[in-house]
Amino acid sequence: MKRSEINRILREGREFCRRMGFHLPPFADWTPEDWQQRGHECDEIRDNMLGWDVTDFGLGNFAEKGLLVFTIRNGNARLPQYVKPYAEKLLIVRPHQVTPFHFHYAKMEDIINRGGGDLMMQVYNSTEDYRLADTPVEVHLDGRCSVVPAGTVLRLTPGESITLPTYMYHQFWAEGDTVLGGEVSAVNDDNVDNHFLGKVGRFPEIEEDEPPLHLLCTEYPPAPD
Ligand SMILES: [Fe+2]
């Protein structure tokens, strides 16, 4: 992705959060220059990959397949100094912008429509060899359990949420308007915990055509010693 495209996505995402009245923590505003001044007191942000995360899943068409994420909080399964067992993310999902089929090996998550348009969520079980299963899917929506056919698309209107257990394939997109999505989950490690059905990338290669507005969660410089 070009840096200019990432900057535009971040600007529009921040404007959408403002419009929705959702306030972000202070590190959402930090510039690359601010990051040069941050020492080890901010290691939790670096180590647990908090902050901005833009992806086009390596497919080069953000409008069709892409997602803007802001990780608000997270623990770390590999570093014992971080004892937090939970994570929270903001997902900004545009109309007809698909986050393609994937499941998580370790992370159970609730995906919440916190406002905007409708969030469309398609679900399948996984076979043992990680293909889409044709078996009925047990879904839990806001404390209500039901069983739906494989591949069902669930419509989550603002306020509604779904619980996604490990190994349940899901893909989602918005309808009507951009969705302010929430994710409340177990500790998240996007480097190893996502299994995508198709060949996609999780973090983008970036072509630097202008200076970054904000650094992404994969770009923080190490603390000065
Ligand atoms: Fe997911």
Image (cartoon, rainbow, N blue to C red):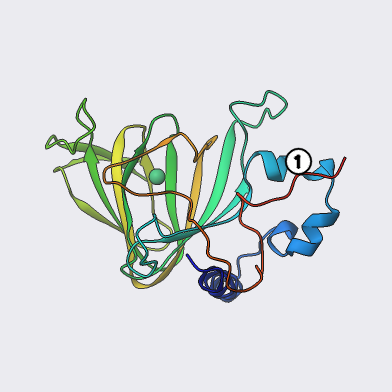
Tell me what residue is drawn at x 21 percent, y 27 percent: 129
Question: Three-letter amino acid code at disc 1?
Answer: Asp
Left or right: 6 in relation to 167? right
Residue closer to the observer: 146 or 6: 6
Which residue carries the number 1 mark? 43
Tell me what residue is drawn at x 60 percent, y 49 percent: 218
Left or right: 41 in relation to 192? right
Task: For label 1, count other residues whose C-alpha is less than 10 Å away and answer few (under 14), some (14-19) or many (20+).
Answer: some
Q: Is residue 216 above or below residue 175?
A: above
Q: Where is residue 224 in the image (x, y as percent from the top left)?
A: 85, 45
The secondary structure type at the circle numbered 1 is helix
Q: Position of residue 214 (x, y in %)?
A: 66, 64
Q: Where is residue 150 in the image (x, y as percent from the top left)?
A: 15, 42
Q: Can residue 22 be seen in this view?
A: yes
Q: Quadrant of ligand 1?
A: top left
Tell me what residue is drawn at x 69 percent, y 30 percent: 82
Q: In this view, does 25 lie above or below 225?
A: below
Location of residue 223 by image quarter: top right
Q: How many marks?
A: 1
Q: Position of residue 73 (x, y in %)?
A: 63, 45
Left or right: 25 in relation to 166? right
Residue closer to the observer: 86 or 142: 86
Residue closer to the observer: 70 or 150: 70
Q: Is residue 30 visible?
A: no
Left or right: 123 in relation to 202? left
- Which of the image's four quarters has the C terminus? top right
Residue at disc 1, CB closer than 8 Å to ligand 1: no
Q: Is residue 60 above or below residue 164?
A: below
